């Protein structure tokens, strides 16, 4: 299969769905947050939003990882702007994206709830939504409702990735 990116704002559930999908479909998971520079992680910890320049090297690294694994990966990556997604598509033609769509209040609630154990500052949720350019309408994008139970989301995405003959 081609690689897939699980995308969306902080707290939408990228890590949770990425892990569930990788386990169910026996795929290798690449957790995008692990590839931010220390400086970028520190900025986010301090409530300073990342810029295009901050994300530049990060996207290059994720692109290299995609190129190195043509057999396919599950990547979690916010991929908030269309230009970021285009860079990843250049690295992996046919790349698909699952967009975990969530509203600001719900994302905020999730980020606040996990704040004690996570580097991401709760003050940055507004900026995530201000930065997000919806991928709906772009090729190879599945939008899902981030509020649905994780098991349902995994089933839906697995079915999208591996359509059965009957479903075609
Ligand atoms: N489908 C879901 N239903 C209910 N809660 C969920 C669901 N998916 C994730 N969560 C919870 O929401 C919080 C954020 O989830 P997760 O860390 O997977 O999001 P994320 O998009 O990877 O976040 P970030 O990129 O900001 O680290 C966690 O506490 C997680 O348990
Ligand atoms: O592009 C970005 O601003 C980042 O990737 C963020 O989205 C976070 O790293 C993530 O969601 C942390 O929780």
Image (cartoon, grey):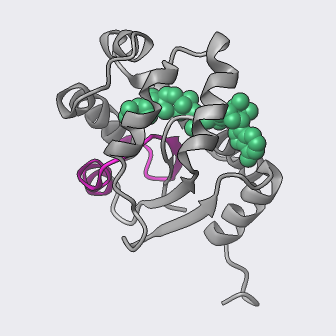
Q: Which residues are magenta?
A: 67-91
* Vertical comparison of 135 with 162: above or below: above
Q: At 32% from the left edge and 53% from the top edge, which residue is drawn?
A: 85
Q: Quadrant of the C terminus?
A: bottom right
Judged left or right of residue 92, residue 159 is: right
Q: Quadrant of the N terminus?
A: bottom right
Q: At 40% from the left edge and 38% from the top edge, which residue is drawn?
A: 128
Judged left or right of residue 120, residue 148 is: right
Q: Quadrant of ligand 2?
A: top left
Q: Position of residue 87 (x, y in %)?
A: 25, 50
Judged left or right of residue 140, residue 167 is: right
Q: Quadrant of residue 63?
A: top left
Q: Position of residue 44 (x, y in %)?
A: 40, 18
Q: Is residue 29 visible?
A: no
Q: Is residue 132 visible?
A: yes
Q: Quadrant of residue 13?
A: top right
In this rendered view, identify the residue nearer to me: 46 or 8: 46
* Vertical comparison of 128 with 49: above or below: below
Q: Quadrant of residue 166?
A: bottom right
């Amino acid at each position: 299969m081609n690689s897939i990116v699980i995308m969306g704002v902080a707290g939408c559930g990228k890590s949770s769905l990425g892990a569930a999908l990788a386990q169910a479909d026996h795929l290798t998971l690449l957790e995008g947050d692990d590839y931010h520079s220390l400086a970028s992680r520190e900025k986010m910890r301090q409530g300073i939003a990342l810029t295009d320049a901050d994300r530049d090297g990060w996207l290059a690294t994720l692109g290299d990882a995609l190129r190195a694994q043509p057999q396919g990966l599950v990547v979690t990556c916010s991929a908030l702007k269309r230009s970021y997604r285009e860079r990843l598509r250049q690295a992996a033609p046919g790349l698909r994206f699952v967009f975990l769509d969530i509203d600001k209040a719900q994302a905020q609630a999730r980020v606040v709830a996990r704040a004690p154990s996570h580097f991401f500052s709760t003050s940055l949720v507004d900026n995530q939504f201000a930065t997000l350019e919806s991928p709906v309408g772009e090729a190879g994008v599945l939008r899902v409702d981030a509020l649905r139970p994780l098991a349902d989301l995994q089933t839906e995405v697995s079915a999208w990735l591996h359509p059965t003959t009957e479903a075609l």
